[in-house]
Image (cartoon, rainbow, N blue to C red):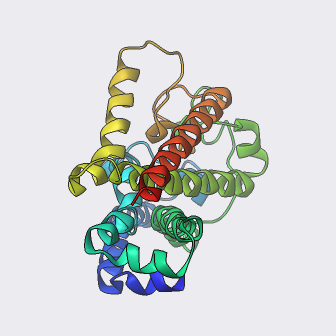
């Protein structure tokens, strides 16, 4: 694992993190600027203003839409790159194939999750340093429209908002890791690196278009259910089912990739 970490270009990794931080920073700046110019008539708090709740600005919409691409950028194609350069074969001589692949998969998952989660933590913290951390109220905060149809575990949100926020960020971390692993598996099948990086984004856009056809009652797109409050109807059952199916598909693709590499 340490060897693979040293393989990463830290300057490139820092640049990717800065890019990922851009949209959350813009949203936090806009919110704080608005907050200082008015007398808080809606009794706002970080729980009602942060990026996971905000459906009225371009930055949150763009961030959650681009999340698959952001998650894949740090290390999802590192395995493919090392296979092309021959470095993978050198590492394989010193360790078993299972150990080598596990290190690639773990690094990809962790960096994929962190690169999309840390900017959200920054966004919430920046707003919390300025805005009073009062509990949201379903009457006083009707302007944000956090209801059962567009928010998972809505009662938890109003009674324990910080726990709800942590669960939401954990879900984002999980999906960031899944996107990175999925891209890692796809990169072993596809030759084009750019297309491999973009496949998660393309699938998410396809799910959003599918949702527009109103075939299903609840959204299947992570761009919706990864936000604390979605722009479409969401349900816990559909979210868990989509997550489980994605984990299963990713596991199958990784197994196929391992079988392919075992023949080298």
User: Residue 10: horizontal and vertical position, in percent?
Assistant: 36, 85
User: Residue 40: horizontal and vertical position, in percent?
Assistant: 53, 56
Q: Is residue 161 above or below residue 75?
A: above
The residue sitting at 58% across, 60% down in the picture is 46
In this rendering, would 147 be left or right of 224?
right
Q: Is residue 164 above or below residue 91?
A: above
Does residue 63 appear in the picture of this structure? no
User: Residue 78: horizontal and vertical position, in percent?
Assistant: 36, 68
In this rendering, would 69 be left or right of 4?
left
Does residue 22 appear in the picture of this structure? yes
Q: Residue furthest front?
A: 263
Quadrant holding the N terminus: bottom right
The residue sitting at 63% across, 56% down in the picture is 170
The residue sitting at 58% across, 42% down in the picture is 247
Judge by depth and name the residue closer to the eye, 63 or 158: 63
Quadrant holding the C terminus: bottom left
Judge by depth and name the residue closer to the eye, 28 or 242: 242
Q: Residue furthest right?
A: 159
The residue sitting at 48% across, 79% down in the picture is 93
Judge by depth and name the residue closer to the eye, 202 or 101: 101
Q: Is residue 167 above or below residue 241?
A: below
User: Residue 23: horizontal and vertical position, in percent?
Assistant: 34, 61
């Amino acid at each position: 694992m340490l060897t693979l970490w040293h393989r990463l270009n830290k300057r490139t990794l820092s640049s990717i993190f800065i890019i990922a931080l851009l949209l959350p920073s813009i949203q936090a700046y806009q919110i704080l600027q608005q907050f200082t110019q008015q007398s808080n008539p809606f009794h706002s708090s970080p729980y009602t203003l942060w990026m996971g709740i905000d459906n009225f600005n371009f930055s949150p919409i763009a961030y959650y839409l681009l999340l698959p691409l952001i998650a894949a950028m740090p290390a999802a194609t590192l395995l493919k790159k090392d296979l092309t350069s021959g470095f993978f074969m050198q590492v394989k001589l010193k360790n078993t194939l299972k150990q080598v692949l596990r290190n690639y998969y773990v690094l990809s998952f962790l960096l994929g999750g962190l690169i999309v989660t840390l900017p959200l933590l920054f966004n919430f913290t920046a707003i919390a340093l300025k805005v009073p951390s009062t509990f949201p109220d379903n009457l006083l905060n009707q302007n944000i429209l956090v209801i059962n149809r567009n928010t998972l575990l809505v009662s938890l949100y109003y009674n324990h908002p910080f726990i709800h926020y942590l669960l939401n960020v954990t879900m984002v971390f999980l999906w960031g890791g899944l996107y990175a692993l999925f891209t890692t598996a796809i990169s072993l099948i596809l030759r084009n690196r750019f297309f491999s990086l973009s496949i998660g984004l393309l699938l998410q856009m396809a799910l959003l278009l599918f949702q527009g056809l109103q075939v299903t009652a609840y959204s299947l797109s992570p761009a919706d259910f990864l936000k604390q409050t979605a722009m479409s109807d969401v349900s816990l059952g559909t979210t868990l089912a989509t997550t489980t199916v994605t984990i299963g598909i990713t596991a199958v693709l990784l197994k196929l990739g391992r079988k392919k590499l075992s023949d080298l």
